[in-house]
Image: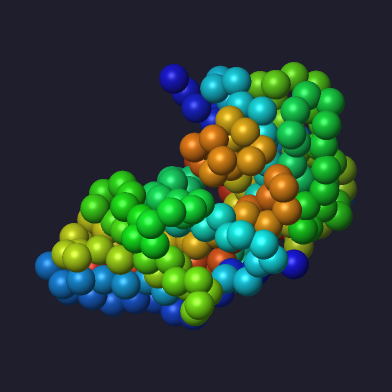
Amino acid sequence: NAGVTQTPKFQVLKTGQSMTLQCAQDMNHEYMSWYRQDPGMGLRLIHYSVGAGITDQGEVPNGYNVSRSTTEDFPLRLLSAAPSQTSVYFCASSYSRKFGSYNSPLHFGNGTRLTVT
Amino acid sequence: AQSVAQPEDQVNVAEGNPLTVKCTYSVSGNPYLFWYVQYPNRGLQFLLKYITGDNLVKGSYGFEAEFNKSQTSFHLKKPSALVSDSALYFCAVRGGYSTLTFGKGTMLLVSP
């Protein structure tokens, strides 16, 4: 059982370049989300999805796009990278959008470390 | 809007001693509270949660947390710390229907 898989593990971009961070889960989870982790800032929610075809914005959505065409995949797109997007990105999924109600904590991937120069 | 405060950036404790990592929260309605741990170069791992019921919640690796509604706190505790407990700990609260809000994290360092 692979859980939540993120690719790539590391990426360096130049300002203005675009890229897609991949996230896949094999647990048939309904809920998927993207967080960024910055020193002293904790984790901040970028976008989330409560099912295929349904996405919504989190706390810091600007500069990022998402889509959810399948239950398994939830890619995060940076259309024009900026140095402020240098961060570690985590994808997380849960069986249910209700989290604790169904004993369904978030399961995290191991992260993508992105540097924008 | 919901929020979580972890007032200590770092907690130092000697192996074998009890440890406490503090967390306070603010949320409208009933609180759904969580603790996660992050080891270097890894994603977060779920430790325990409080949804309802007993104020003392037991979780993985011998950790427990005490919910105090009047003080709006959810402190993480362990009776006897291990060096291997050294990691970054995050408290989180369920905010909107589909979101979790995390604190800034507390680094726990357990010395031999």
Query: In the visual, does B56 lie left or right of B29?
Result: left
- Write the residue at 38% across / 57% down: B54
Residue A112 visible here? no
Q: Position of residue B82 (x, y in %)?
A: 18, 60
Residue A111, located in which quarter of the rendered image? Answer: top right
The image shows residue A106, relative to residue B18, as above or below, that is above
Query: In the visual, does A81 lie left or right of A43?
Result: right
Query: In the visual, does A10 lie left or right of A63?
Result: left
Q: Give whichever of A62, A105 is nearer the camera.
A: A105
Query: In the visual, does A49 lie left or right of A92?
Result: right
Quadrant into which the N terminus of chain B falls: bottom right
Q: Position of residue B7 (x, y in %)?
A: 49, 80
Residue A70 visible here? yes
Q: Position of residue A80 (x, y in %)?
A: 87, 48
- Write the residue at 54% across / 22% down: A27
The image shows residue A102, relative to residue B53, as above or below, that is above
Q: Give whichever of A23, B94 is nearer the camera.
A: B94
Quadrant into which the C terminus of chain B falls: bottom left
- View extreme (front): residue: B53
State the count of labels: 0
Colour scheme of the picture: rainbow
- Write the residue at 58% across / 30% down: A95
The image shows residue A76, relative to residue B72, as above or below, that is above
Q: Position of residue A26 (x, y in %)?
A: 56, 20
